[in-house]
Image (cartoon, rainbow, N blue to C red):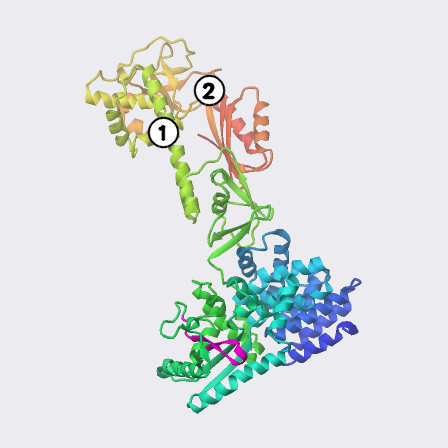
Amino acid sequence: MKTAAWFSYYKQLMHHCNHFINKQMISKVRQVYKQTPLPEGFDYKIGQALQIANIAVVELGLGNSAVIAVLLYPLTKDKLYQANIETEYNVEIATILRGMDRIKQLYSKTPSLETENFRKLLLTMAEDVRVIMIMLADRLHTMRNLHVKQPEKQQYIARETAFLYAPMAHRMGLYKVKTEMEDLSMKYTVPSIYKEIAGKLSETKRERDRYIEQFIEPLRQKLTAAGLTFTIKGRTKSIYSIWNKIKKQNTTFEGIYDLFAIRVILDSDIDKEKAECWQVYSVVADMYQPNPKRLRDWLSNPKANGYESLHTTVMGPEGKWVEVQIRTKRMDEVAEKGVAAHWKYKGVQGEATMDTWLKNLREVLENPELNDKEYMDEFKLNLYDEEVFVFTPNGDLHKLPKGATLLDFAFAIHTHVGSTCVGGKIAGKNVTLKYVLHNGDQIEVITSPNQKPRPDWINLVVTSKAKQRIRQVIKETETKQANAGREILLRRFKNWKIELDESRLSKLAKKMGYKNLSDLYIEIANEELEVLDFREQYLEFDKREEPLQEPPKADEFTKRSTKQEDVLIINNETKGVQYSMAKCCNPIFGDEIFGFVSVSGGIKIHRKDCPNAPQMISRFGYRIVKAAWEASSTQQNICTLYVTGNDDLGIVTNISSLISKEKSVTLRSISINSDAGMFEGRLVLTVTNTQELDKIIHKIRTVKGVQQVTRI
């Protein structure tokens, strides 16, 4: 490190950091710079980093880790130095550098810089408060050197500083930084007004100071004579603050009452605070004419945020208005260090957690001994820990409550997007519906037209909007399904010439375990309840209400003629038996089977592992008949397979292509649902026997991405 252009900055930094800098670390940084081939023009970046480090140390009170991070950043940013920072230096420096890099990336992917949400996002993106403070030091350095930029660049940077950086400094209690940023921003955005106000304030700073002293001195004498213990502070308000008042009050410079502000701070016992504050007011009012419209009594009625003070505006020497603030040492400490911090006094309410944080932060900034011990490490930036900020692929910013999931985000975009969401991608990786969002996530929502909300989705979301939309869509879907199921039932019963009694139907639905008729209709619509089987239960229930002929028992069953191919042996008979395959289990040649005598007199053939078999055997054992297959059969039978696996590109095509090559197997239908990088599907096939079925199941399992194949 020996380039003359910036060597003086390095010497200044070492002078300011001498009492706390880690000599070994700074020596290592110097060696890195010496050994790294630096591109042309890099000296400017080094000088800039040194100046920013000086601001961070001298004006913001930052310590060793922040200084080292600022000096290393030009190298890590340009990928000139890619060592393991945690190993070479420490975790704190690595965290700061990571935060600085995240904020750099954040700038590159969002156009929403002018929003309050973006300010909050900047704060949450930084794991360590020092990242934000370094960013403020960087911007303050830029503003102080803005004259070297092109006019268009000056305008952009000045405006950005006013709407983004100055408010952030304000939130953090860095009022001196905030005031300087506002004034410098105004200097470039409205130079004529800036010059006008600066000229009207006073010709020189010395004259302004003289006026304040002229106001204070006789007041100091009077208060001392009254036996009070106190200090007095005086200042001229900033140019930006005065301009703001001119705009808000729709007045002229001359119409602003309080260009000068005086603060009297009493050292009073707590039981004498109010009395002595009013005593000071009495002295001020005797000396200078007060404006009765400008008296603010926050002693008798403190603000909701705890702010206590007595404000009055009086006519000072030379006919100039001066604001006088009267408070005690305790009140001033509360107002300055948290409970009624200046940012809250300006109108930001309801963030009590930040008060304590700011109070601790200011104590660290104001106490050089704490800086020596790097107590800044204790302060993590959790100012907005109740919210997360995420982006769409286009860079649009969305604010959601902490704990929100991918599904919440999908519904925040649009109800249809949420209703058809099957997963998402973040940084190229698939995530599930229940993925919990993190600050800065850029999310691509994946949808499918076959997807629809399910009741369990309610447990996957935290926002009221998402919960409401899920319930609404489910209700609309269920209503449509119930209407469709009812139409199916009415049509089929009409074809069978069976009169449908709603009252009897409702009783039967309740007996079958349904909460209401709608649930029954929905199962019919979804083909989860076979209408033919339900007809048997309805007629049997009907029979108990109005006695009908008993269904035939197994040993009384009589053969009936049929034109179908006789491939079964039922009760030792091979010919003339009327039967059909049960749709609940779709038996095929080779399955172990049994017959069930229906009310209409026909036989339903079920697999012995049919899900309905235990109930039928236990409740209607007298209607069970033996059934077995003939020695051979060429009849095509329907069966359904349930397939799950990874949602890889082309997997459906691969499965259907494989089945199409099988001469004895036909694919009748296929339905696939995707969710979070996984898929589940139902394949309806026609096969001749179980051997063919086992063969095709084995082949489907060999398709890349398929995890499980099960017969339903």
Identify the image quadrant of residue 51.
bottom right
Give x and y (percent) for residue 370. 54, 78
Does residue 401 sit above or below 168 in this rendering?
A: above
Magenta-drawn segment: 306-325
User: Would residue 86 be visible to someone looking at this image?
Assistant: no
Is residue 127 a member of the stretch shown in magenta?
no
* Label 2 sits on residue: 637
The C terminus - image quarter: top left
Q: Residue at x 42, y 38 (%)?
A: 454
Give x and y (percent) for residue 675. 50, 40
* Mark 2 residue element: strand
Mark 1: give few (<14), some (14-19) or many (20+) Cα within 10 Å.
many
Q: Gap in Å between the C-alphas at discs 1 and 2? A: 30 Å
User: Would residue 114 be visible to someone looking at this image?
Assistant: yes
Total marks placed:
2
Q: Is residue 596 left or right of residue 163?
A: left
Q: Nearer the viewer, mark 1 or mark 2?
A: 1
Give x and y (percent) for residue 356. 45, 70
* Label 1 sits on residue: 482
First-in-chain label (1 vs 2): 1
Give x and y (percent) for residue 42. 76, 64
Seen from the viewer's position, the closer of residues 220 and 364 is 220
Does residue 141 sit above or below 561 in this rendering?
A: below
Seen from the viewer's position, the closer of residues 174 and 102 is 174
The N terminus - image quarter: bottom right
